[in-house]
Image (cartoon, rainbow, N blue to C red):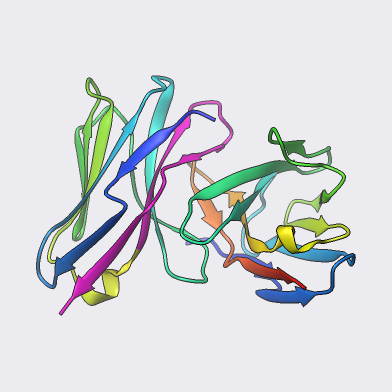
Amino acid sequence: QQQVKQSPQSLIVQKGGISIINCAYENTAFDYFPWYQQFPGKGPALLIAIRPDVSEKKEGRFTISFNKSAKQFSLHIMDSQPGDSATYFCAAEASGGYQKVTFGTGTKLQVIP
Amino acid sequence: GAVVSQHPSRVICKSGTSVKIECRSLDFQATTMFWYRQFPKQSLMLMATSNEGSKATYEQGVEKDKFLINHASLTLSTLTVTSAHPEDSSFYICSAGGWDEKLFFGSGTQLSVL
């Protein structure tokens, strides 16, 4: 599988702060980039996704920034809350890939009060 | 959002026995479902793609005779771990392909083989 590199591996943020997770990919055929949130013992849940025709997408406190030329994208969580504490996975998929997604390595986020 | 139900959530079995895990899409039809394996603190590793009415496609290194996948209807896929051994202990997760590229995940099954 093509790699999607994700950093940092873990992140501690104070309540109210901004959490930033970065991902980079190599396969230029990727054209759909979702982010998933996973709580312990649960399956991942789609958080937000972006396609390369836009450079930014915002949904509530969550924003994806996308840099097509650098082949990088990031997740920003504004006003981070303790309830946001979870593991976040970036992912990538190519059109015609029939939803065969390549996942990043994951970032464990802890938001402290 | 769409709901994917996965059962059981946790199973403990003896070495050498077989375990079946079910994955159901409750409010939509999914021609394609996926099975993943996840080790502690690691990412999801795709094991196989399950297509309704046809044979599953397995990823390189995944033993198809050990991990039997059946996708008999548009709402149900099953993964059977045959002759399970302790090294098969893991968190198994299914997902179902919905609309607009979206994937919906089950809640996972923690398999412990004694």
Residue reaching furthest left?
A17
Question: Is A46 placed left or right of B80 in the picture?
Answer: left
Residue reaching furthest bottom?
A113
Question: Is B79 placed left or right of A64 in the picture?
Answer: right
Quadrant containing the C terminus of chain A in the rendered view: bottom left
- Compared with A92, A62 (above or below) is below
* Image x and y of residue A58, in percent: 20, 49
* Image x and y of residue A21, in percent: 24, 49
* Image x and y of residue A61, in percent: 18, 60
Question: Is A38 placed left or right of B80 in the picture?
Answer: left
Q: Quadrant of residue A86?
A: bottom left
Is residue B59 one of those drawn in magenta?
Answer: no
Q: Quadrant of residue A97?
A: top right
Q: Quadrant of residue A12?
A: bottom left
- Taking depth in this image into account, of A29 and A89 the one nearest to the observer is A89
Q: Residue at x 48, y 50 (%)?
A: B43
Is residue A104 one of those drawn in magenta?
Answer: yes
- Look at the image and give the residue range highlighted in magenta: A87-113
* Image x and y of residue A62, in percent: 22, 56
Q: Residue at x 71, y 36 (%)?
A: B61
Question: Is B23 placed left or right of A70 in the picture?
Answer: right
